[in-house]
Image (cartoon, rainbow, N blue to C red):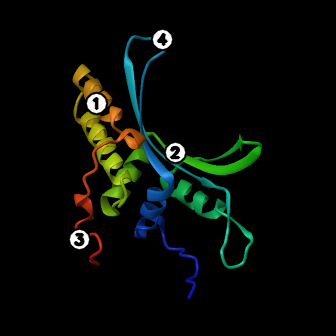
């Protein structure tokens, strides 16, 4: 039986966590400022998905605009579109990014309550560690070193996977 569209608030269930496990990423951007000798560490959450998908049941394209707009509204971010051409085929996607303090706090609050289950959880934990380190300390060389060390084995470069966050994850509360 097909369930109807869930219209509950984004922060009322783990749906966004599952969607993020599939289509989001946590990023650590480290670069020198162009006009200074200082280094900037920027953390952000990015969710990108195709603008439409074909449903298995009715074979028509369904737009993801409404749900992506709802997520963007919840996070208080803009919803952007992107067109890419790969091998002479065009791809259209929606993108939203959380990168300021307000957006990042929404992300942290949400993922504190609704856990990611894939290896993205490991990326989130590292990303969150840098965020907490940044919030507790001034931007120092030790902060930059820690961020560089974590970023080296982050996302696709990760070589160590610890899955203890999955213990008892199947139990209902």
| Dot 2 or dot 4, earlier in sequence | 4
Q: State the image coordinates of residue 129 (x, y, percent, origin top left).
A: 26, 41
Please state if 152 lies on the left or on the right of 89 as rendered: left
Classify 10 Å Cα crowding around label 4: few (below 14), some (14-19), many (20 and above): few
Q: State the image coordinates of residue 95 (x, y, percent, origin top left).
A: 59, 48
Element type at mark 3: loop
Of marks 4 and 3, the one in the foreground: 3
Q: State the image coordinates of residue 86 (x, y, percent, origin top left).
A: 70, 42
Please state if 82 lies on the left or on the right of 166 as rendered: right
Marks 4/3: CA–CA distance: 50 Å
Element type at mark 2: strand
| Dot 4 or dot 1, earlier in sequence | 4
Residue drawn at (75%, 71%) of the image: 60
| Dot 3 or dot 1, earlier in sequence | 1
Of marks 3 and 2, the one in the foreground: 3
On-image quarter of the N terminus: bottom right
Residue farthest along the right direction in this orientation: 88
Of marks 4 and 1, the one in the foreground: 1
Label ID, residue 35: 4
Element type at mark 1: helix
Residue drawn at (38%, 52%) of the image: 120
Circle 1 residue = 149
Pointer 4 with pointer 3, Cβ within 8 A = no
Circle 3 residue = 168
Circle 2 residue = 97
**Nearer to me, 100 or 55:** 55
| Dot 4 or dot 3, earlier in sequence | 4
Residue drawn at (26%, 57%) of the image: 163
**Above or below — where is 99 with respect to 145?**
below
């Amino acid at each position: 039986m097909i369930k109807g569209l869930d219209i509950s608030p984004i922060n009322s269930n783990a749906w966004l966590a599952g969607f993020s496990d599939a289509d989001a990423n946590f990023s650590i951007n480290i670069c020198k400022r162009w006009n200074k000798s200082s280094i900037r560490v920027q953390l952000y959450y990015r969710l990108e998905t195709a603008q439409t998908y074909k449903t298995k049941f009715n074979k028509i394209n369904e737009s993801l605009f409404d749900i992506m707009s709802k997520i963007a509204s919840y996070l208080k971010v803009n919803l952007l579109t992107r067109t890419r051409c790969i091998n002479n085929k065009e791809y259209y996607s929606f993108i939203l990014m959380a990168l300021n303090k307000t957006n990042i706090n929404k992300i942290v609050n949400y993922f504190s309550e609704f856990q990611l289950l894939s290896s993205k959880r490991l990326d989130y934990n590292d990303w969150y560690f840098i965020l907490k380190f940044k919030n507790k300390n001034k931007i120092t060389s030790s902060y930059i070193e820690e961020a560089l060390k974590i970023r080296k084995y982050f996302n696709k470069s990760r070589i160590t996977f610890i899955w203890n966050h999955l213990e008892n994850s199947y139990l209902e509360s």
